[in-house]
Image (spheres, grey):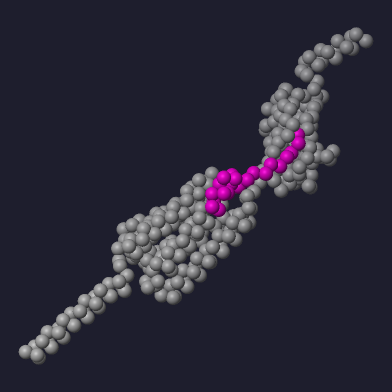
Amino acid sequence: MWPLVVVLLLGSGRCGSAQLIFNVIKSVEYTLCNQTVVIPCFVNNVETKNITELYVRWKFKGENIFIFDGSQQMSKPSSNFSSAKITPSELLRGIASLKMDKSDAVLGNYTCEVTELSREGETIIELKYRVVSWFSPNENILIVIFPVLAILLFWGQFGIVTLKYKSNYTKEKAIFLLVAGLLLTVLVIVGAFLFIPGEYSTKNASGLGLIVLPTVILILLHYCVFTIAMGMSSVTISILILQILGYVLSVVGFSLCVSECIPVHGPLLISGLGIIALAELLGLVYMKCVASNHRTIQPPKKAVEEPLNAFKESKGMMNDGKYKMHLQL
């Protein structure tokens, strides 16, 4: 009996530990942004230098989903996990991680079994899904608020034009401003409803496009309002250039954000929208100041005509008096 025990101990001493030891990884997560899913499996004490002595089996809910037989150099994924694979060259370093397409990934517990000659071991890893928002909550708020604020400021400018500069525009121009403003308002409202905070989706991208791209209408409306109210000047041209710059930044930021699952150029998009709103605010303030000066400096037409008519009448009466005195003489 004792000789047998000694032989077994000596054999285990030559072969190392009788059990393969794994790095314990309880769970791994993937997100919408992942194209492939990697379930890690790391063996710490692989000793063989020959891949033919290794055998790897991955299981999901007790069923084999992938088998690698080193002795036959064969990899066999199951039909439900057809994209599953491992990298055989990494097995000698103890890496038996399973890679698969995101479309094949199923949430749950996966079992990694590795056999090295007479030694074997297994570990269980849970695959989880993590929701990643496209934009942060603060970015979502600013993306909606800036265009809405810009539209409200435009309606303020429209009110000043209709109240203070009635003689400067025709009915057709007023209808154009009204229809274009309503169209822009509807587009941005629809975009805000589609742009729901959450993961990247076609719906969210469409909503963001309806919020950002139609703001070019604001530039045209701003130009029309300026030409009706006060004409083009260095100040109005500067405001329009600032607004065009904001639109360019917002469009560039939009194109970069749509092409990425997790946008890193959100601040560029938001800064462009903020500049557009700032240009609308400057335009409203400038129009308000010009309208106030126009009202206080230029006296009403009636107030000018009444003294002039009175002066003419008094002058006519004096001429009539002189004529009568001449006749009497």
Q: Quadrant of residue 56?
A: top right
Q: Residue 119 sits in which quadrant?
A: top right
The N terminus appears in which quarter of the rendering?
Answer: top right
x, y percent for residue 107 = 76, 42
In the displayed structure image, the side of residue 259 where residue 71 appears, left or right: right
Tell me if 155 is positioned left or right of 287 in this view.
right
- Give 79 or 326, whichever is nearer the viewer: 326
Q: Residue at x 44, y 75 (%)?
A: 172
Q: Which residues are magenta?
A: 125-145
Nearer the observer, 16 or 252: 252
**Where does the image place residue 78, in percent across and percent down from the top left?**
79, 44
Residue at point 58%, 49% (across, down): 140
Q: Quadrant of residue 226?
A: bottom left
The x, y position of residue 221, in whole percent, is 44, 64
Q: Is residue 183 visible?
A: yes
Examine the rendered structure and indicate whether residue 65 appears above or below residue 249: above
Q: Is residue 129 magenta?
A: yes
Q: Residue at x 18, y 80 (%)?
A: 315
Q: Quadrant of the C terminus?
A: bottom left
Establish if 229 lies above or below 279. below
Question: Which of 329/94 is in front?
Answer: 329
Magenta-drawn stretch contains 237? no
The answer to whether residue 260 is seen in the rendering is: no
View extreme (top): residue: 2
Residue at figure coordinates x 80%, y 39% from the top left: 60
Q: Residue furthest front?
A: 328
Q: Residue furthest right?
A: 1
Q: Residue furthest bottom?
A: 327
* For residue 104, above or below residue 218: above
Q: Is residue 15 above or below residue 123?
A: above
| Lateral position of residue 10 relative to residue 212, left or right | right
Q: Position of residue 310 (x, y in %)?
A: 24, 77
